[in-house]
Image (cartoon, helix red, strand yellow):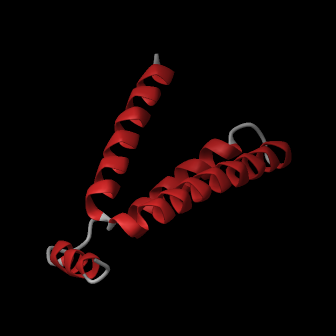
Amino acid sequence: MLIAVYGAVGLVWNVTAVSLRQSQLPEGLLGRVTMSFQMTNMCAGALGTLLAGSAYQGIGPRAPFLAGAVLLCLCGICFRRPRAGAPAEAAAAVSTYR
């Protein structure tokens, strides 16, 4: 059941991220940004698999889950919602590329 929920959430995330990216980027940068996103995603998945396997072998079966929880919390802290004026600044930055 949880795998189905995870798949549905992943599908919604993918559609939202791609739609936002297509609406915000200039046409000339869309291909480069999309390929950069895909390359980063694939490399992070491969690196995460290696690190999780090493943690499992070295520490135990709960280590990858604990490390994932810690990483998720750290990302939540580091990439928290920007301040109120940020969208206007981002729009101004994007308009300079057009």
| Total numbered badges shown on the rendered structure | 0
Instruction: Estimate the x, y position of residue 79 in percent, counting from the top left.
Output: 38, 66
The answer to whether any part of residue 79 appears in the image is no
- Image point (78%, 42%), residue name: 56
Question: Relative to 35, is 4 on the left or the right?
Answer: left
Which residue is nearer to you in this view: 35 or 76?
A: 35
Question: Relative to 26, is 84 on the left or the right?
Answer: left
- Image point (32%, 68%), residue name: 26
Quadrant of the image occupied by residue 98: bottom left
Instruction: Estimate the x, y position of residue 62 in percent, counting from the top left.
Output: 68, 39
Quadrant of the image occupied by residue 44: bottom right
Which residue is nearer to you in this view: 19 or 41?
A: 19
The answer to whether any part of residue 82 appears in the image is yes
Indicate whether 3 appears above or below 9.
above
- Image point (15%, 76%), residue name: 88
Which residue is nearer to you in this view: 5 or 11?
A: 11
Instruction: Estimate the x, y position of residue 59 in percent, counting from the top left.
Output: 80, 47
Quadrant of the image occupied by residue 30: bottom left
Residue farthest to the right? 57
Residue farthest to the front? 28
- Image point (84%, 49%), residue name: 58
Indicate whether 22 appears above or below 77.
above
Indicate whether 82 appears above or below 65.
below
Question: Relative to 10, is 56 on the left or the right?
Answer: right
